[in-house]
Amino acid sequence: MILSSDFRSTFLQEQIIKRVGDRFDPLSLRVAMSSSQSLMVSENKTDDEKEEIGQILEEIWQDDSWVPE
């Protein structure tokens, strides 16, 4: 099944909230699909927290089990 970008971004956003939001509250999140990739972490996080969030996001992106079939 081929999923639209909007549909896929909704599932991606749910995974990020589930894995990052509970641990690093408050979380402001916007998922937008495009041809370029970028990541911005704000809300006065420490460098260690930003690194940990980046690692979690990479794990989510590489593990596509959250994408419905």
Image (spheres, grey):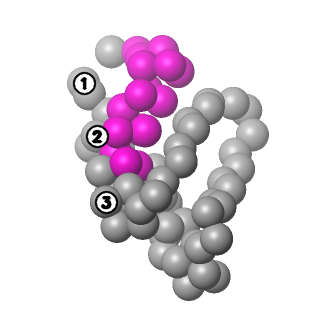
- In the image, is 24 to the left or to the right of 69? right
* SS assignment at label 3: loop
Look at 73% across and 32% down and name the residue there.
35
Is residue 67 visible to us here? yes
Residue at x-position 31% and y-position 60%: 22
Kindly identify which residue carries mark 3: 22
Disc sitting over residue 50 in the figure: none
Q: x%, y% of residue 26? A: 46, 58
Q: Amino acid at mark 3?
A: Asp
Q: Which residues are magenta?
A: 2-17
- Asked if residue 39 is among those painted magenta in the image, a careful observer would answer no
Is 6 displayed left or right of 35 in the figure? Answer: left
Q: Amino acid at mark 2?
A: Trp
Mark 3 or 2, nearer chain start: 3
- The answer to whether 47 appears left or right of 12 in the picture is right
Camera-side mark, 2 or 1? 2
How many labels sit on residues?
A: 3
In the rendering, at what x and y percent does residue 30 appear?
A: 57, 38
Classify mark 1: helix, strand or loop. Answer: loop
Residue 15, quarter of picture: top left
User: For the residues marked 2 and 1, what is the alpha-carbon distance in whole angstroms?
Assistant: 9 Å
Residue 51 percent across, percent down from the top left:
57, 76
Q: Identify the residue at horizontal 59%, vertical 73% (top origin).
A: 45
User: Which one is nearer the viewer's eye here, 18 or 9?
Assistant: 18
Q: Position of residue 56 (x, y in %)?
A: 43, 65
Res 69 label = 1
Question: What residue is pinned by disc 2?
Answer: 66
Q: Quadrant of the C terminus?
A: top left
Whole-number angstrom distance, CA of label 1 to CA of label 3: 26 Å
* Residue type highlighted by circle 1: Glu
